[in-house]
Amino acid sequence: VQLVESGGGLVQAGDSLRLSCTASGTTSSPNVMGWHRQAPGNRRELVAVITAGGGTNYADSVGGRFSISRDTSKNTVFLQMNSLKTEDTAVYYCKAVFILDTNYNYREVWGQGTQVTVSS
């Protein structure tokens, strides 16, 4: 399974960006897809996740500004980022989680990351 991200870039504070991530090399759809980010010197942190059923969860720092969605038929997840702030600058990583069995053993797959830089 491979995750390919796109959509990062350099924007100014207040602008918007849309990240995309597609899972390939799998015949099953991920149970959960999401985005994490890591700024220099910081730990990787959760940004937003979405389940196969459409349930979502967001970090407090992005609630109301970011929106996660997915196209299950294409194994693709999107992150719409509005009202970007300089503190949103980070490498954004896509993650897919596959539940393997009824004991909830799972497999995580990570993308290579895409840089988002927000200038003031």
Image (cartoon, rainbow, N blue to C red):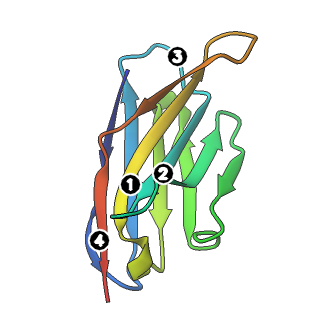
C-alpha span from label 4 to label 1: 10 Å
Quadrant position of the N terminus in the picture: top left
Name the N-terminal-most of marks 4 and 1: 1
C-alpha span from label 2 to label 1: 6 Å
In the image, is 91 to the left or to the right of 30? Answer: left
Residue type beneath disc 2 = His
Q: Which residue is mark 2?
A: 36
User: 50 or 36: which is nearer to us?
Assistant: 36
C-alpha span from label 1 to label 3: 24 Å
Residue type beneath disc 4 = Thr
Q: Which residue is mark 3?
A: 28
Q: Position of residue 38 (x, y in %)?
A: 40, 57
Which residue occupies 32% across, 90% down? 120
Crowd band around label 3 with a 10 angstrom C-alpha radius: few (<14), some (14–19), many (20+): few
Vertical order, 20 against 1 (above or below):
below
The numbered disc on residue 117 is 4
Q: Which residue is mark 1?
A: 92
C-alpha span from label 3 to label 4: 33 Å
Which residue occupies 52% across, 16% down? 28
- Tell me if I can see residue 75 in this picture: yes
* The quarter of the displayed image where residue 60 is located: bottom right
Q: Secondary structure at mark 3?
A: loop
> Viewer-nearest of labels 3 and 2?
2
Name the N-terminal-most of marks 3 and 4: 3
> Viewer-nearest of labels 3 and 4?
4
Residue type beneath disc 1 = Tyr
